[in-house]
Structures are given as C-alpha cells and as structure tokens.
Amino acid sequence: MNAKQTAGRQPMRVRAELRVLQGFFVREMSVFLSNRTETFFQLAGMSCWAVMFGVMGTFVTRYSRPDIKASLQGCPDYTSFLLIGFLIGQLVATARGNATWLVRSKAFPNLYTAPCSLPTIILGANMWKYCWIFVQVLLFMAVAHFLFGVEFHLNAGFFAVLAAGIVLMTALDLMGAGFRVITKAESDPINWTIAISGMVLSGTLFPIQALPEWLQPVCFFHPQYYINTLARRTMGEGVGLEAVWRELLGFTLTSLLLLFVGYWIFRIGFRRARVEGSLGYE
Amino acid sequence: MPDAPQPVHGEPLLEVSHVTKRFPPIRKGLGGIRTLWEQMRGQAQTVSALDDVSFEVRRGEIFGLLGPNGAGKTTLCKILNALVIPTSGHMTVRGLDTIKHHHALAPDMVTVFGGESDLFGFFAGRLGTQQNLEFIGDLWGLPREVTRERITEALKLLDFEDKREEWYQKLSGGTKQKLFLAVPLILRRGFTVLDEPTIRLDVPTRRSVHDLIREFLNRQHGSTILLTTHDMPEAERLCDRIAVLNKGRLALVDTPEGLRRRSRRGVVLTLRLQLTGRPGNDEAAARAALLAASPGADIALDPEADRQRQDELTTFLLRTQARVGGSSDQYVTPQVIATLSERSLRLMSLNVAEPTLEDAFVEIVGGDGKEDRA
C-alpha cells in the first residue's frame, strides 16, 4: 500500500472508529438504563452524598478556627472545599480501572477480533460511564447549590484541569492494567496505594495543613492533591486559565508523559498476556 | 508438510507456516519466583499446544481442523486473531502476518468461538438479540439499515425470529449458539473462522446450520471457511479438505474421502451362507473360497454362528485388506460372490461396510500421529 492510498484511507478509518464509539455508547447506555432500579439508586445516592457532605461542611465551617480559610485552596468556606473535593474525586475516579476492567473482561477477546483499534475499544467501552458520571455530578452540584448555596464556577480553567486529571488517572490505570492483565490480581500496587492513601493524603476531605507537619510533604507525591488544588482554585475561587496556566501546564505535561509511559507498560502487559494465552481469563 | 491432496480451489488465502506454541509454565511462588527458579534449573514444564504445524487454506474452500480435545484447534484460531502470539513460525492471510497486521486483516475476517462462547462473551446479557447484533454491525462498520436487513434475514434463516427482543441472558444455550452463528451471516466476510460452531445445537438445527455454512456463506457469499470441530459427520458433510491435529501436531491434510481411504480397517463384508452339509466341512469350504476370492483377508466366524447353525445358516465376517475408493466394491465383492457360486456355497445375504471418517480419525489420533505424517 503506498502513501497516497494510506492517506486516502485515513478519514475512512477515523469515521469507522467514530462509528464504533457510537455503537459502544448506545450499547452501554442501553445496558445501564435497562436496570431502572440501579439508575434510580445511583441518582438518589449522589443526592444523598451532596446532602451529607453539605451538612458536614456546614457544621465544620460553623465551629472551625477563623484561620482555616488560608488553607482552603481558594474556596470561600469549608463546605465548598469539601463538596468540590468530593465532586472532582468522583469525576477523575471514573478513569480508574477502565482499561483493567476491559482487558480482564470476557468480552474483550471477541472485541479485539473486530476491526477497530485498542484505544477505541477502551474508550468506547467506558464512554457512557463518563457521560453518566457527568449527569450525576450535575445533580450533585444542583443539590449543593440550592441547599447549601455553594457556587460552582464552570470555566475553561476547570475543564482543562478536569481533562488533565482524567489523563493522569487514565495513565495510572493503564500502568495498573499492564500489571493486572498478567497477574490477574484484583489490585495493582500503584492504584492500590493511591486509593488507600487518598482519603488522608490527597486533601480531598480536609486541608493537608490539618495533618502533622512531618506528613504534609508526603501529600505532594499524591497525584490527586494537585487535581484537587487546581480544581478548587478554578471551580471554587473562580480563577481562569490565565491564573493557573503555569501549574496546569506542568501538570498536563506530566500527565501526558505518564500517559505515554502507561500505554507502553500496558502494551507490555497485553503482549505478555497474549504470549501466555490468558486474555479473557480471570 | 503432509502429502497434498488434489487442489480444490484457488490460491492460498491462509498460510500456516511451522507454527509452534508452547505456553509458559504456570507461575508458582510469590511473583512467580519458584517458576523462575525451576526455569533456571531447567525443570519448568511448558505446555505444548502446537508443534511445527504447517498447512494452507485456499480461497473459497471449507477447510476443517479436526482433532480431539486439547489438540490445539482453538489455539490456532486465537493465533489467527492475534489473541495468542506463537512461540515460533507464523500465519499469513493474503500474505499479511496475522499478528503484525491484525488490524489490516480484521475487516475481512470474522471468528465465532462457539466452543468457548462463555469465555468469549460478545453479547450483553441485558440486551435483546436485535440490539446485540446491531452492535456487531457497528463494530464492523456496516450501515445500520444493512445491518437491520441482514439481522432479519439471519434470524429467519436460523429460525429464532421470535427471540428478537429477548435478552441474551434469558436465551437457552442452543439459542445463544444461534446468536453467535448469526454474526457471520450478518457480516458476510471473505474469511470466516468457525470454532466448534454447532457444539450446543440439536441435530435438526445442526443440519440446517451446515446448509447455511455451505450454501449461504461459502457458495452464495464466497466466504472461505476455516472450521474446527470434533464432530465427524459435520467435518464429512462440510469440508473440502481436513487437517487432523493431534496433541498439537499436524497428523495429515486430506479430503474427507482421502482420509477414509487411509483407514487400515479396510472393508468389512458380512456374508450369510446356507449350510448344505456338515457344519465343519461347509465352514472350511467357505473359508477356502473367501481366501481364494480375497487373498490375505481376515476371516472370522460370527460369534452368533452356533445359534444360526440351527437355522442352517452361518455368518462370516470378512475384513479385506483392500482400501476403499472403488477397490472393494469393484473387485473384492464380485469376486467373493463368483467364488462362492463356483464352489456351490449358497450366499443368502451380503453386507458391505466401508470405513468411516471416524474410523480413520480414531486410528490417526489413537497413536501419536507421527506415523501418518507424510
């Protein structure tokens, strides 16, 4: 095949991949919505989380020390701090386990026989999940706004932070997937450490200044700490891209580099599983 | 390469060249440390799934891969779909390596892993037949309208139109199998791989599926078919050529007729003779006549002979050394009849049993298959 033919096939291939993504989306949505009880409980659950965190945030704000504001990463009060932390945590956590779940699923070997690329399969199988989490998050925001008066600034800066956060979590997930597709383990060291330490070290539920001084530097190694910090500044404080672009650029470049490394590790694991003939096995 | 049968179709589509697959040993110990230690000491046992397998499938033919459980049939199909990487050797489709060029080959290929449909679950349990099949059309880039038309046709052909809206998880095992078989009928690709496609189907459905594979996929739509099975009638009915795999090794490649011809069982003639004199004399005369008609034949008296003698009848089993393909019917049988007649032995009935594909298969896989490698 010459270069001209390859170039001619490119748009066709892109169209075909988009068609596959659409097919995945419709399928996953239909499967999810077929269980109406589950749909209801997920929406109700998200509303309850918003109410519970809102009540908790209100109490803590009322009885907290006046100097707490300095450690709230630009948020006007602790309620906003807590609710935005939880919200961004939910959004980026959606990227966790996506590749792993897919390559270890029984559907994967047959999907791989189809004429579409591996990234399309991974993205397609998880696209509905992202859309659904956005629906849930919108509900969460509505509850938080109307019941607790929390202001959410949905500006370009926030979406850029969100995108970089998802890229970072996807990168870590791909690294984990590379490990788990070989070992068939339910967990991997990277994502396990991040998940376990996240409650305390990521600054999601409380400012890291509340931790002992010797523990605070450890937080700087937790990826979610950076996502939380930037998300609170943009969404909570309302600053735009111009105010955070330096930090965001560094964060985005790191995320992209890790995505590249993650995909490379995943390919190694995937290849290893094909050598062992264990694709689709639990 | 085993001795090649007569060419039946066009140029090679799939070429399997010295493919060997040894699966690494199961990891033992923390992080596989024990296995690593065993490997260093040369004690780790690899599992040999395929051993230097070479054959080719020609465009337009239905090629069967026949073998007992664990022969390596599914492993071969997985290598064809880049799901397993071979230890050595390679497979090419239209000259392209199946591992390196998987994405270039995938648009014109479809594989049904019928034998492992639980392992390779294409379909969503909570979706109906129509929706599940529409998704398959999306994966292969079929226009929606074409997919819908073909789904209707496939459901009609496979006789489960009434299950169009039924969730996959509520379908019976046989209907699930039909759903898998609907995939190649809808996609109609140039190369179809069917891994034990009728394993859960009842006999009438299996027969109609055979017709669909032969008439609809192969003849009407020109799809080259690689069929793995251990069902002999299926292989005999469908395949133009058959490769027999045994313990990962290719025993031989031949036409179904050629395979039967290879059987050492030969033809068994069951003869009922009317006794005219003393039993001992008659039997000796009959044996002599049969030996004269078919020198070297294995002649046995039917175990029921004593009881039959009361009715003045006796039955001989004559196992000829001649192989099928004309020789037995054309030469041995008329000669037996003529010799018995010459010696005034009255033949009451004669039954000719030729060796079946199953006989040949059991003989091939019964040993280690080496002696049959040409």
Image (cartoon, coloured by chain):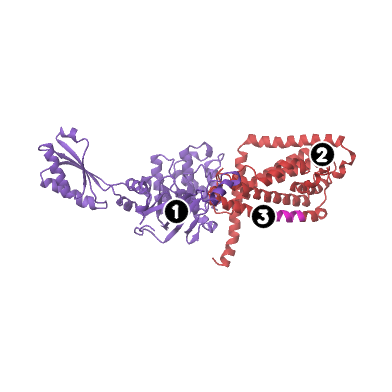
Q: State the residue in front, B165 or A71.
A: A71
Q: Earlier in the sequence, mark 3 or mark 2?
A: 2
Chain B: its colour in the image is: purple
Residue A253 location, x and y as percent?
73, 56
Judging from the image, what secondary structure is the residue with disc 1 in?
Answer: strand
Circle 2 packing at 10 Å, graded few (<14), some (14-19), many (20+), is many
Does B163 lie within the magenta span?
Answer: no
Q: Chain of mark 2?
A: A
Residue B289 location, x and y as percent?
14, 46
Q: Return the mark for residue A79.
A: 2
Q: Amino acid at mark 2?
A: Thr
Chain A: its colour in the image is: red
Judging from the image, what secondary structure is the residue with disc 3 in?
Answer: helix
Magenta residues (range): A250-259
Circle 1 packing at 10 Å, graded few (<14), some (14-19), many (20+), is many
Q: Main secondary structure of the magenta part?
A: helix
Q: Return the mark for residue A261.
A: 3
Query: Looking at this rendering, what residue extends furthest in the right direction?
Result: A66
